[in-house]
Image (cartoon, rainbow, N blue to C red):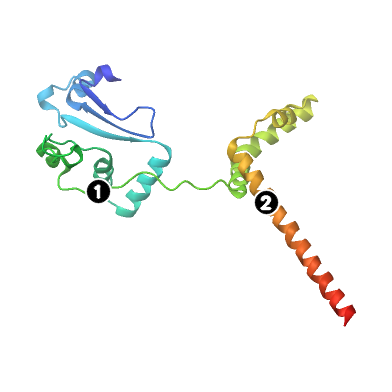
Amino acid sequence: DAASMGNTLYLGSLKSEIYFCIYEKDYEQYVKNGTPLDEAETKNRFEIRLKDERAEVAVDDLLEMEDVACTAYSIINHYVRFVDADPEKECRNWPLNERWVWFLNGQYRSIKLTTKPEEYTLDRTLLWLTRQVAPSLKMVQKLDDLRGTRLAKDMIEEANLSPHHKKILKQQQAALDDVVTARQKGRKWIDDLKEEYMES
């Protein structure tokens, strides 16, 4: 509700998994509760807004560090810097602004809120199906039995496989091919032994 928040600065896309919101908390309290601006306990507010994987990584860090400020400043440190321009230096070497240093309050730890992407596997897909899809699919199948329809079958037949689904199929096919090849090699080895034995 930006209209009730006074001046607001967003850092990052509101559609992304991480962005920051800085706004006039005293003005917000004035609009919402009628609190005079000079009586507000908090003048400005800096919010870290996280979703999905980045929220999970932040929670993991919070559980490990057991220090909200440490985790919060570490996130801010990695993604935000306010600096003073120096034409004699490259921008990446510009010094931190004194007010920003004051805001950081001596906290300089940094964490990146991403993890190494996990490879898609058949086990992960089956686990996801069991938890998320199977109950709903079972309900639709029972509905088909009651109505004499074939909604579940039609949905499965008309579904399009994504690239990672196709990758899993290739992995499984390759694994089966390896098993077949190993069996063929095993049979040939046994046949060779039999032939060698017969000759001797």
Which residue was labeled with disc 1? 70
Could you tell whether 26 is left or right of 123 in the image?
A: left
Whether residue 172 is situated above or below residue 156 in the rendered picture: below
Q: Quadrant of residue 45?
A: top left
For this orientation, the residue located farthest to the front is 199
Q: Residue 139's spot in the image, x, y percent?
A: 69, 33
- Which residue, as the protein is rendered here, is positioned at the far bottom? 200
Q: Is residue 40 above or below residue 68?
A: above
- Which is nearer the N-term, disc 2 or disc 1? 1
Across and down, in percent, residue 35 comes to 16, 22
Q: CA distance from mark 2 to mark 1?
A: 47 Å
| Quadrant housing residue 200 | bottom right
Look at 20% across and 40% down and name the residue there.
Answer: 92
Q: Amino acid at mark 1?
A: Cys
Mark 2: which amino acid? Ala
Secondary element under disc 1, as helix, strand or loop, is helix
Q: Which residue is mark 2?
A: 174
Residue 49 in picture, x, y percent from top left: 33, 34
Given residues 4 and 89, the one toward you in this image is 89
